[in-house]
Image (tube, rainbow, N blue to C red):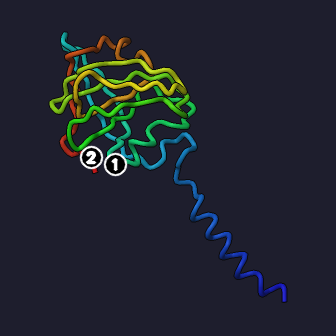
Amino acid sequence: MRLAYVPIVALLLALAVACGGGGGGGDGDGGTFLTAAITLTGSAGKRAELTVELARSAAERGRGLMFRESLAEERGMLFVFAQETKAGFWMKNTKTPLSIAFIDGEGTILEIQDMEALSEDLHRPAEPYRYALEVNQGWFERRGLGLGDRVEIPADVRAE
């Protein structure tokens, strides 16, 4: 009679592994976001390279960098919208203080704001934007980058 339970237990174990497998999620490893390399260029010609996770779908943009314990210094997240938007950002469930750059469709930084960890304050730029780039707080300043500087976004990066 006990052997009759073996197939059921095996099936349950297989389902548990399939549903909770090691593919990421909220465990701090970035989950299933695709990545891209971008280059930022300052007005004096200074360049900075950055590897970004791409938040292109509504679900990816909604999750963002929530539940992460930290963000590596040369990493960030690029939020990609299909068209210009004035959508706001908050830091609910985001444990690392961040800076966000709002970028137009041509790759020009329109505005940079600092955001405090776990805050529910809404951050929204004065004008519409196409991309938003989140990095560790102070990253832009440490590299001498600011308003009017350029972000080279690969042509194959677009919203889903």
Q: What kind of element bears circle 2?
A: loop
Q: Which label number is shown at residue 159?
A: 2
The residue lying furthest to the bottom in this view is: 1
Q: Which label number is shown at residue 57?
A: 1
Decide: is 15 above or below 95. below
Q: Is residue 46 left or right of residue 50?
A: left
> Residue at position x 30%, y 21% from top?
48
Label 1 Cα neighbours within 10 Å, binned few <14 / some 14-19 / many ≥20: some
Indicate the quadrant where residue 137 lies. top left
Q: From mark 1 to mark 2, how far is it between C-alphas? A: 6 Å
Q: Tell me whether circle 1 and circle 2 mark residues in contact (CB < 8 Å).
A: yes
How many numbered marks are there?
2
Indicate the quadrant where residue 77 lies. top left
**What residue type is disc 1 on?**
Ser
Residue 15 locus on image (x, y percent) = 61, 69
Q: Is residue 39 left or right of residue 23?
A: left
Return the disc, 1 or 2, that comes first in the chain's sequence.
1
Q: Is residue 119 left or right of residue 102?
A: right
**What residue type is disc 2 on?**
Ala
Q: What kind of element bears circle 1?
A: loop
